[in-house]
Image: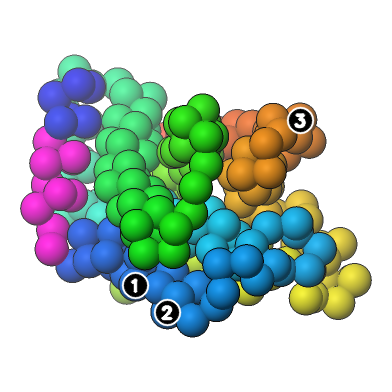
């Protein structure tokens, strides 16, 4: 399984298009949105300045892009080409394949997170305590495992032709409603009541709590843990289902 993880990480890091959209693109969006704003300008209802809010939002967006878009399309294409069928002939157990996919996808999110943080600190003067930088990076990275598992599940649900539109639909819905592109507080109340149960809302809430000097809320951690269990279980179930078809 370790060999497969290393292979997946190496292959991903060599993909120039992937690196652009998951690492460079979120940092560019941060500069586009937060760049013109004053460093002291605050976003209503959050207690955060614009640079602080969008640093977490864009770092989370980059991690989401890396694990969701990359995982789902890659797995669907591997299924179509027969690569997954070949892996089943090896000693690698089914759970090992699923875990390897989730772990390798989540590992490559670190560049996306770090680049946004570096840009925010150097260009917009974002300043946090040392423990906050460490906790912020760790929370965004750890939370990305939830969406890595979702990407694996989608890769087994959709065919090679259908995986991109299905992933894009889920990707944009989670990004927008989760408050990654715009403040959650500008939504009407009925939409806020729906969006607060989405994994992306809890995901960004982890980092936002750390930015104001608090520990992540237990509600957000519990919600993300529940989604991780559901998505991982779904990915394993769809993998076994796909195996029976082969």
Residue 146 appears in the rendering = no
Extreme-right residue of the structure: 189
Extreme-top residue of the structure: 91
Task: Judge whether residue 212 is colored magenta.
Answer: no
**In the image, residue 182 lies at what x, y percent?**
63, 73
Identify the residue shown where x is 78% and y is 76%.
186
Residue 191 appears in the rendering = yes
Locate the N terminus and report the quarter of the image it occupies: top left
Q: Secondary structure at mark 3?
A: helix
Nearer to the camera, 187 or 97: 187
Residue bounds of the magenta highlight: 7-16
Identify the residue shown where x is 86% and y is 77%.
188
**In the image, residue 80 lies at what x, y percent?**
22, 58
Q: Which mark is residue 32?
A: 2
> Dot 1, how many residues are within 10 Å of its Cα: few (below 14), some (14-19), or many (20+)?
some
Whole-number angstrom distance, CA of label 3 to CA of label 1: 32 Å
**In the image, residue 165 lies at what x, y percent?**
43, 75
Q: Which residue is mark 3?
A: 218
Whole-number angstrom distance, CA of label 1 to CA of label 2: 6 Å
Q: Nearer the viewer, mark 3 or mark 1?
A: 1
Q: Secondary structure at mark 2?
A: helix
Check contact, mark 1 vs mark 2: CB within 8 A.
yes
**In the image, residue 74 lies at what x, y percent?**
26, 55
Dot 3 or dot 2: first in sequence order is: 2
Nearer to the camera, 66 or 123: 123
Q: Which residue is mark 1?
A: 28
Q: Secondary structure at mark 1?
A: helix
Identify the residue shown where x is 31% and y is 37%.
107
């Amino acid at each position: 399984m370790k060999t497969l993880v290393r292979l997946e990480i190496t292959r991903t890091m060599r993909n120039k298009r992937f690196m652009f959209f998951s690492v460079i693109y979120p940092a560019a969006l941060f500069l586009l949105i937060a760049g013109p704003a004053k460093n002291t300008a605050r976003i209503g209802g959050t207690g955060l300045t614009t640079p602080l809010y969008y640093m977490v939002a864009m770092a989370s967006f980059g991690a989401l892009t890396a694990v969701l878009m990359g995982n789902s399309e890659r797995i669907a294409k591997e299924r179509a080409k027969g690569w997954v069928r070949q892996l089943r002939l090896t000693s690698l157990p089914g759970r090992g394949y699923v875990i390897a996919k989730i772990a390798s996808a989540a590992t490559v999110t670190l560049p996306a997170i770090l680049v946004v943080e570096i840009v925010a600190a150097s260009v917009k003067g974002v300043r946090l305590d040392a423990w906050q930088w460490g906790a912020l990076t760790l929370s965004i990275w750890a939370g990305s495992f939830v969406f890595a598992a979702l990407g694996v599940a989608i890769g087994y649900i959709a065919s090679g032709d259908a995986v991109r539109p299905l992933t894009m639909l889920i990707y944009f819905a989670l990004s927008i409603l989760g408050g990654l592109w715009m403040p959650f507080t500008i939504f009407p109340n009925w939409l806020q009541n729906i969006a607060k149960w989405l994994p992306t809302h809890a995901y960004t809430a982890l980092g936002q709590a750390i930015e104001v000097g608090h520990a992540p809320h237990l509600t957000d951690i519990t919600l993300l843990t529940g989604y991780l269990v559901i998505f991982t279980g779904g990915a394993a179930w769809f993998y076994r289902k796909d195996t029976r078809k082969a």
